[in-house]
Image: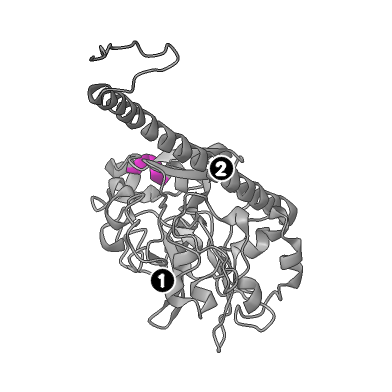
Amino acid sequence: MFQRITRQALPASCSRGFTLVEVIVVTGIIAVLAALILPAVAQSQSAARRIECANKIRNVNLAMLAVADSTGRFPACGNFTDKAPFEFLHSWVVDVLPGIEQSSIYNQWKLGASIRDPQNQPLTQLSIPVLVCPADISFQPVDEHGSYGNLSYVVNGGIGYTTYSNGIHDCPVDVEGFRLDLNGDGFSCDDPNSGGDKGTFLAMGMFFNETWLEGVSRRHHTLASVTDGLSNTVLLSENVRTGYNPASSSDPFTSSWASPHSLLTSFYIGDPCLSGVCLAGNVNYQRSNAGIAAINSGLTRPEGTSPIPNSFHQGGVNMGFADGHVQFVSQHIDGNVYAAFVSPQGPSQGLLKQTLTAGSW
C-alpha cells in the first residue's frame, strides 16, 4: 500500500554549488592578487606620467636651445619696463612659442606691450598642452568657462632674482628677499668694487630679469658662456607651484605661463650664504637644497609661492640640461652638486669663488 521512496542520483549534467568555505578561499585569493597587482598598476601609471612629463620638458628644452642658437643668446626669464608706469611684459615662454609649435600665438603677441594689453591678455589664458606635466594635479583643465594659462616648467634662476629695492634698480636678492652681498665686502646692490656682486650673480644662474630694450637690467648667457659644460648645466625644471592660480584668475600676471613675475618664471637654489652675506666661514652649500628651498618642499604651499623645483613624482624632479638631455634629479641631491648644476661657470669660475679657499667645496 505504501510506495517505497528511493533516492535517485542527480543527473550527470548537474553540478553542485560552491560551499561557503570555498567562496571565502577564492575571495581571499582574489584579494591577495588585487593587493599585489594594484600597487604595480599605480606604479606603472606613475612611471608613464613621469616619462611623458620628461618628453614634454625635453621639447621645451630643445625649443629654448633653438632660441639661444638663432638669436645668439638665452632669453630673459621675465621682461619688464623700468620707467613709470612700470609694466609686466612677458616671460621666457613667449620666446619659445615658435619652437613648441605655437607660432600662431607668438605672431599675435604684441612684444614690448604690457601683459594686460587688450591684444595680449586673452592670449595669456590659452591652454598649451606641452607646458603642462601630466602629473601636475594643480592643473586647471579646460571647462565651460574657457581655457587657462597652465604651466609646469620653470627656468634656472640661480641664487635669486633682481628687483627694485630701497630706490636702487637691478638689485640682486635671494629666494627669501635678502639683498645679496656675494663678495662679502659689506655692500649689496650698489657695490662700488670692480665687478661687484652682479658679476658673481651672473655666474650663479642661467636666466635673469631684464628691462625691455633698456639698459637698466640687461644680463644674459649664451651657449659659449656656459663654460662648465652644457651637460652639467640645468636650463629647466619642473615646478607644479607655478602657472594658473585659481585664487587670482582675474589677474593674468599672477596666473599665467606668460607672466614675468619672478616667483613664477624661475626656480632658485637656497642661498648658501647666511642672510645673503658671503663672508669667509659664512658659506655652506648644503643650504642650497635645504629648508624652503629644498627640492619638493613646496608641494603643499599655495600656487605662486614656492619658486623651487616641485613635482608630484616620487623622489625628485625632471630637469632639462643645456646639451638637450633630460635627467631625473633626486630631491636628496647634495647641495654642493645641486649648486654646481645650476651655475653655468662652475665653482672655479665664479660660484662664490672668493669663498672656495675656505673649504666650502
Percent of width and height locating residue 243: 50, 64
Asked whether, in this view, residue 258 is left or right of residue 6, the answer is: right
- Image quadrant holding the N terminus, namely top left
The image quadrant that residue 11 belongs to is top left
Residue matched to label 1: 189
Q: Residues within 10 Å of mark 1 (few under 14, many from 20)?
A: many
User: Which numbered circle lies on residue 52?
Assistant: 2
Q: Nearer the viewer, residue 323 or 297?
A: 297
- Measured as percent of width and height from the top left, residue 222 is found at 63, 52
In the rendered image of this protein, does residue 198 appear above or below residue 361?
below
Q: Main secondary structure of the magenta part?
A: helix
Q: Residue furthest bottom?
A: 85
Q: Earlier in the sequence, mark 2 or mark 1?
A: 2
Query: Per the image, is 119 magenta?
Result: no
308 relative to 54, above or below: below
Residue 270 or residue 273, whichever sits in front: 270
> Separation of disc 2 and disc 1 at Cα?
42 Å
Can you give x and y, in whole percent of width and height, for residue 87 in the image?
56, 82
